[in-house]
Amino acid sequence: LMAHLPPSVPLPEIAIVAGALLFARAFAADPLAVYTCPDPHDYTQRMPWHCSASIRYGHLFGEAITTAGQRAAIGVWFPPDATETTPERLAQAGLDQAPQKLGAPAAERFATVSDHIDSLHAKEMTEPHWYVWLLAVDPSRRGQGLGSALVRSLTAKADAQGAPVYLWTVQPHNVPFYEHLGFQVVTHAIEPS
């Protein structure tokens, strides 16, 4: 199956908006996305902006990659020297506009969970590491190995550097997917509400 998968390539800047729509579709049932924007209409209207700004953050400070051709999967991750989110970087990507674009309550809900995750990340990974920030596969293409191919492209690079890879997920059914790719659960946590 792997031989027939499209290669991983950088996501062009011009494709960020289309990538954001893919992310919004892929994350429509994600617990953090639903918690952030519980109203389906608000989600449809506001979440693509958040996804676009998040991909832009990856494009600016890490790597935003996709599957060649149809761009049916997208990953955003950061190299060991860029795993810390900073207010300056968030502003440069436009994520500082979240209260206006998502609505203040949604932005606050997202920030509460994100701050909690950032604190766990800092505590759990004290050595240089790659950080998987986002991974999305178009719902119509799930189960075809596209997400695995993207993650394997990163883990091969990290292995060559001798660096571990860290990620978090709020979707319980993602855990076996990542374990199959060699990841281990470091901690279980309940996000603050």
Image (cartoon, grey):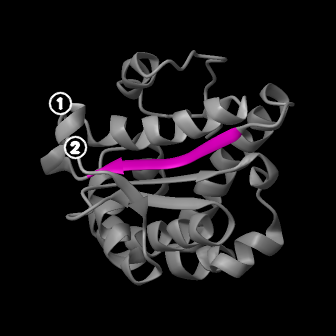
Instruction: Report the Cα–Cα distance between label 2 and label 1.
Output: 7 Å
Q: Residues within 10 Å of mark 2 (few under 14, many from 20)?
A: few
Report the amino acid beneath label 1.
Leu
Q: Quadrant of the C terminus?
A: top right
Q: How many marks?
A: 2
Which residue corresponds to the image point at 54% horizontal and 63% vertical from the top-left? Answer: 106
Majority SS type along the magenta span: strand
- Residue 122, position as x, y percentages in the image: 82, 37
Q: Nearer the viewer, residue 129 or 57?
A: 129
Reading the image, the residue beneath label 2 is 5
Q: Is residue 168 magenta?
A: no
Q: Quadrant of residue 178?
A: top left
- Judge whether 28 appears above or below 156 on screen: below
- Judge whether 17 appears above or below 105 on screen: below
Q: Which residues are magenta?
A: 130-137
- Residue 137, position as x, y percentages in the image: 29, 49
- Residue 4, position as x, y percentages in the image: 17, 40
Side of 137 relative to 77 (left or right) = left
Which residue corresponds to the image point at 82% horizontal and 74% vertical from the top-left? Answer: 88
Q: Which structural element holds mark 2?
A: loop
- Residue 7, position as x, y percentages in the image: 32, 51
Report the amino acid beneath label 2.
Leu
Side of 126 relative to 169 (left or right) = right
Q: Are marks 2 and 1 in contact (CB under 8 Å)?
A: yes
Which residue corresponds to the image point at 81% horizontal and 69% vertical from the top-left? Answer: 87
Reading the image, the residue beneath label 1 is 1
Q: Which structural element holds mark 1?
A: loop
Residue 162 visible to the viewer: yes
Which residue corresponds to the image point at 45% horizontal and 59% vertical from the top-left? Answer: 65
Q: Quadrant of residue 146?
A: top left
Q: Quadrant of the N terminus?
A: top left
